[in-house]
Image (cartoon, rainbow, N blue to C red):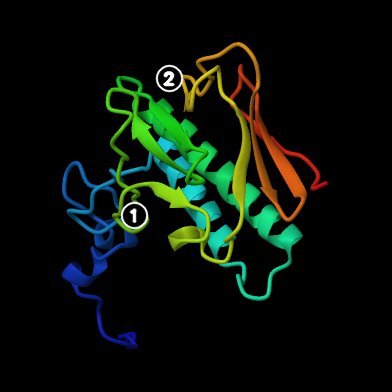
Amino acid sequence: MPIICGAMASPKLSRMTPRNMLRHAPGESALKPPGASGKHKAFTFIEVMIVLTILAIAVVLAVPMFSQTDVSKLRGAARLLQADLGFAQIESVSHGDDPRVMVFDTVNNLYHIAASSDPATPIINPAGGAPYVLEFGLGRATGMDGVTISALSVGGDDQLQFGIYGELDQSTPATMTLSLGGKSVTITVDPDTGDTSVSDIN
């Protein structure tokens, strides 16, 4: 009589195949735990652009403000204004029912961003929760003291409004000139695209 080596496999163990071990409940994927959802909340393009713009403003503010020359102050002020223009544009696209407007005060060398339905009241800055107002030499523009808004061309008034597609409410380019110590720099906004450019400091 032949001798059988090893224990006879149990019928139950013989049915424990990889296919059975990976068995899952109906409607669930075998590659993820039961109950796991395949849906993920995604950010919209506008939300991503707003975050990137806020980060760009933060980078500008991170530049050391002490012992700055007139040229570096003007360069920092121009970049800050350019970033705020970009934020106002993105906000206008995301709030098509009430586009944003930038209101300039050349006497006090400041500006604020507001809803076009209430241009006298600044909107809230999401980075800090304060009214979106900038005065050179104070707050976000600390270290840029002495910078003035020496010239402004925004359609004949003191307000620059963006449309729901990011375009301007005027047919000609808008310009804002900042000056300090006999030097100046001009920021230009394209009327069709809302894109901004900064001139050389002269």
Name the residue at 64% across, 48% down. Answer: 78
Mark 1 Cα shell of 10 Å, populated few (<14), some (14-19), many (≥20) = few
Q: Could you say where residue 198 lies in the image, as x and y percent from the top left? A: 72, 40
The disc placed on residue 31 is 1
Residue 128 drawn above or below residue 92: below
Q: Position of residue 183 (x, y in %)?
A: 77, 50
Quadrant position of residue 143: bottom right
Task: Please report the residue visible at 25 percent of the width from the left and 76 percent of the height from the top.
Answer: 9
Judge by depth and name the residue closer to the eye, 72 or 12: 72
Quadrant showing the N terminus: bottom left
Left or right? Give the position of 65 relative to 134.
right
Which secondary structure lies at badge 2?
A: loop
How packed mark 2 is, by other alpha carbons closer than 10 Å (few <14, some 14-19, many 20 or more), is some
Residue picked out by circle 2: 164
Tell which of 159 and 164 is nearer to you: 159
Question: At 61% across and 19% down in the image, what residue appears?
Answer: 191
Q: Earlier in the sequence, mark 2 or mark 1?
A: 1
* Element type at mark 1: loop
